[in-house]
Amino acid sequence: MSMLQVKDLSIHFGGVKAVQNVTFNIDAGIVYAVIGPNGAGKTTLFNLITGVYKPTTGEITLDGEGIHGKSPNELATRGVARTFQNLQICMNMSAVENVMVGAHLRLDRNLVKAALRLPGLKKRDAELREEASELMNFVGLGQYVEARADAMSYGALKRLEIARALAMKPRLIFLDEPAAGLNPKETIEVDHLVRKIADSGVTVVLVEHDMKMVMNLSDRILVLNYGKKLAEGTGEEIRTNPDVIAAYLGAHA
Amino acid sequence: MKKSVYNGLYIVIAILVVLPFVLPNSFYVDLAIRMAINAVIVLGLNLLVGFAGQISLGHAGFLGIGAYASAVLPTHFGWHPLLAMAAGAAATGLLAAVVARPIFKLKGNYLAMATLGLGIIISIALRNEAQWTGGPDGMPVPAMGMFGFELTNDKQWYWVVAILLSVSVWASLNLIDSPFGRALRALHGSEVASQVVGVDVVRYKVAIFVLSAVFASLMGSVTAHYVGFVSPNFADFFHSIELMTMVVIGGMASVYGSLVGAVLLTALPQALATFEGWETVVFGAILMLSMIFLPKGLVPTLAAKFGKGE
Amino acid sequence: MLAQFLQFLFSGITVGATYALAALGFTLIYNASNVINFAQGEFIMLGGMLAVFFVQAGLPLPVALVLAILIPAIVGVLIEKLAIEPVRGAETVTLIIITIGASLVIRGLTSVIFGKGTHSLPAFSGETPIDILGATLMPQSLWVLGVTALVVVALWYFFSRTLQGKAMLATSYNRLAAELVGINTGWVLFMSFAMSAALGALGGILITPITLTSYDVGIMLGLKGFVAAVLGGLGNGLGAVVGGLLVGILEAMGAGYISSAYKDAMPFVLILFILFFMPRGLFGGKSTDRV
């Protein structure tokens, strides 16, 4: 059975049908890409699966358990992580603190213990800071550990979001255009980073416009157009699918 | 957040220890006590407003509940003052917890409206239930005593309040640099980002709202016993605004800013007493000018100016 | 029974009309700048106090009334120029404190200049009550309702039929887009403060013969106007009018049938209750955050 199953998923905003009857499955351990022209509903699909929006109709199951309509924080407890197309970094915190927030669910969040600064909690926090620094190294932000988030470049913040998501120790991670707005060198670095994440055993779902990166990384690809599923298959199948060529790749070729 | 933030705590404690020996007379001791009481309230409010990014325009209502619990329960029912204080805090916490769930689904100006309304309802109730509260005239409060010892003179009060303040500063610093505090600051920075990493946003807002309300209630009780009198002004809208202004003038999301804000705004009415009849005008003008020229508050502005090497 | 009900209803819609004007003032400024102007109530107070002062000084009523509207409008514009424009885009709390500072300055100055006494204004067309099904309606109430209705129609015409009105509406939807198509959004801000101060002052003048006035009536009137604006859904003009009337009626009914001591608390109980179930007021619609 597939890890994530999406069946007949739809959401309407007033009269706008942003996602319509989309069905697909994602197996554990693969890199799965969602592509499509601007406004095709890719980010909306992410928002639906990660609980930010509630679907109008349809089902989403994770490991056989229905998760549609659950809130984002409930999904976080099930090992679902994500990044955002428009950066969602906490600019009022330092870079490493942003990553530490990612480990929220793995920590003792007791208010009283925190106010009394009990030694156990303090020690755990120091370990976490160490772990978060290592994660920042992993995504290539080693030099920014002590930086304030609002002093970092756009490209660095994109990777900071990935580090925060990884701090959750997720099983399934949704990356929403991780390479958007990056220069070619940074794009290659992100490409390698996604490969490393996938190799570490995390299932990756990717929205990306950079076709080279998508073709290079993905095991399977879903193509959306006007909120509907246009095609799904391996890179090769998508590349040769006449509908896709007409609707999407054709514009680029 | 670095270890150095605790250095400020040592300075605060040092000032609190030295102060009674340098203050020239009881007028200043009284002023210092009221500053410290306000500072504790503002610390709690800043956790809600500055760190978690929420608004409360009704916090004086909670203060009023605490103050009146300490006045009414011992006077009419013969409760021990400490028990009355605890009952006031418990009632405040319960009220805050019950209303917080629906209130914190609201944002921005709608949240401002709801908290403002809550505060006003409390203050009107205190004003109207004259058979218990003395109505608009207020009522006297019995002295605070424990274990056969009565808190009567200002020096005793000073040390009690100084210890409360030091502990509050320490606890606030701890809280901010903890998983709980990071979750609070994160939901201020990006609500959706904190949700997707697992922060139950409404729960955290409720928790910090209840905590700051209970702080206000406890300090309302302390004020009532210290002043020996309560009046509905404790709970009114304008007092809520004063508390909020202390947070903003000192600096949002700044522990030491809370102290500076409380000190300045507690002293201001004393300083303005010389402007006979014009106090309100000058006070209003100062509020406007400080917000226009120091929108980030004193402490963060100064820190940014002098702390570049950090 | 019916007579009593009608009596409460009349007094409710009369006061409600004043709240509606105040709520429209909140709405105008909110739409132009996203600011909740806590000084709105002071314009109501100022309108009433200035009218009293000018009439006592011997000015003919029409001249006194025009001045009592014009001066608050100038005060409104001054607040905008001196205190709101310099801090564009500041945090909600900062803006709230600025406008409360402004309200304190206005109130303080009024008490210094006119004293702390309570004042009244003669009714515009006599005090002979009109009998309707056993309830009495004061002629001044007709003035309040008639003028409010006229203002609402005029505002509707302004916003739906004139270029200036449409420019103001466009700015409230999207400031940047409005600037790009050449709308002078500075002018829009200026106009909205002038208009909302004038609306508040007008309400204050009309109601003063019925409720009396003094330097400190502004805060409660303003807060109730804010309740009315939120009740209708912030930014919604029609909602503000409906909200104002509802708040007025509820208050009069509550005072009559439940408890007059808790009259001032009723609007706030109502708004809390409404917000618990409709987080954006009666006509506020639903918003979706884009992420």
Image (tube, rainbow, N blue to C red):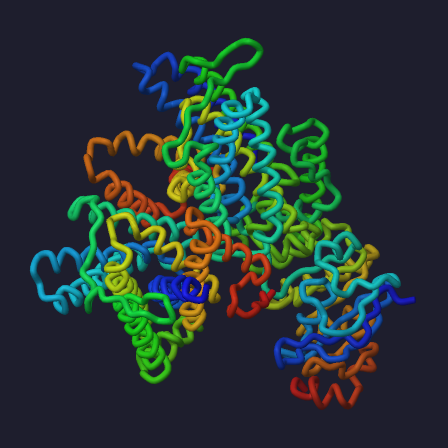
Q: In front: C69, or B208? A: C69
Name, please, the residue furthest toward the top: B148
- Residue beneath the point at 44% across and 64% down: C5
The front one of B181 and B114 is B114
Q: Residue furthest left?
A: C58
Q: Is residue B259 above or below residue A44?
A: above
Residue A33: give x, y in percent of width and height.
76, 71
> Which residue appears farthest toward the right when viewing the image?
A1
- Left or right side of A61 for C121: left
Does B138 sit left or right of A33 as displayed? left
**Which quadrant of the figure has residue B240?**
top left
Whether C220 is drawn above or below C55: the answer is above
Question: Which is nearer the eye, B18 or A236?
Answer: B18
Q: Please tell me which residue is depicted at 69% across the width and 85% down the height of the picture.
A: A248
Q: Is residue A143 visible?
A: no
Q: Position of residue C3 (x, y in %)?
A: 41, 65
